[in-house]
Structure formats: structure tokens, C-alpha cells
Image: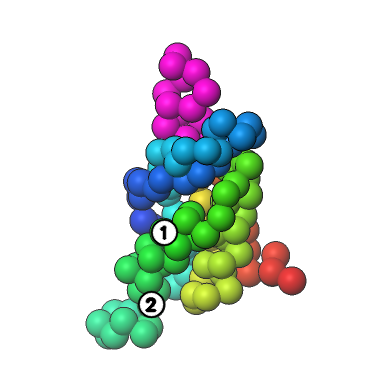
Amino acid sequence: MDKIFLDDIRLSIKIGTTEKERGKAQLCRLNLTIFQSIEKAASGELDKTVDYRAVYGLVQELSRRRIFTLLEEIALLICREVLQKFKAKRVKVQIGKVRPFSKRLGFVGVEVERQRSWLP
């Protein structure tokens, strides 16, 4: 299966398990992989593939839409929305907080992968 990926997207997200954490946006980094055949895109027509700019815009919008408690929440939200709005067969999202709760921890994150059959 072919892959389209957007790596190292930097997001400011209000996220955390405590009210203090959620009070201020935190720097997060996201990698997104979309699995689909890109054979038809050989024609050079954008409508035959996934518009990377549109995916990036969706990720930005979702990260600003609300306050999150867990990284798992936003990772699954992004998977669901990308699968619903784009021609993706499968999506993988890696997201993490940069410099989370301890100065001795540089990064903490989650990775989720979902297929179109996961959608309700």
C-alpha cells in the first residue's frame, strides 16, 4: 500500500489531565500517515489523490476546536476525521507533547492506526 505522510506538524493544543495543564496551550508534534493507492495520481490531477494542504488545515482546525484531556482523544479524532473526509483506506497518527510534565522528559506520545472499517 502506498503512503502519503505529513511529518513534524507543530501544534499548540490545550491538553492535559489537570486544569493547570489545560489552561495554557502546549507544544505538540504530530506525524500523520495516510495509506492509499496513489496510482491514479500519476496523471498529475489533485482530485485523484489526497490534498496535503487540506489535511494539514483539518489537523490545525481540530487541534484548536476544543480542550483535550488526553493525547489519545485528539489522535482518534484526527483518525476519524481524515478517514471520513479523504480517500484514505487507513490512517496512522503519532502525536506527543514536547517537554511534558517533567523537565527530564523530552517527549511523551501515542500512536494510533485505524482503517476505514473502524468508522461507524
Residue 12 drawn in magenta: no
Res 78 seen here:
yes
Residue 42's place in the image compared with 70, above or below, is below
Res 28 seen here:
no
Q: Residue 53, percent across and down?
A: 32, 68
Residue 109 drawn in magenta: yes
Q: Residue 107, percent across and down?
A: 45, 28
Q: Residue 84, percent across and down?
A: 58, 74
Q: Which amino acid does label 1 sit on?
A: Gln
Q: How many marks?
A: 2
Residue 60: give its label.
1
Name the residue: 47% across, 69% down.
Answer: 36
Classify mark 2: residues with Cα within 10 Å, few (<14), some (14-19) or many (20+).
some
Q: What residue type is labelled 2?
A: Thr
Residue 45's place in the image compared with 113, above or below, is below
Q: Residue 67, percent across and down?
A: 57, 49
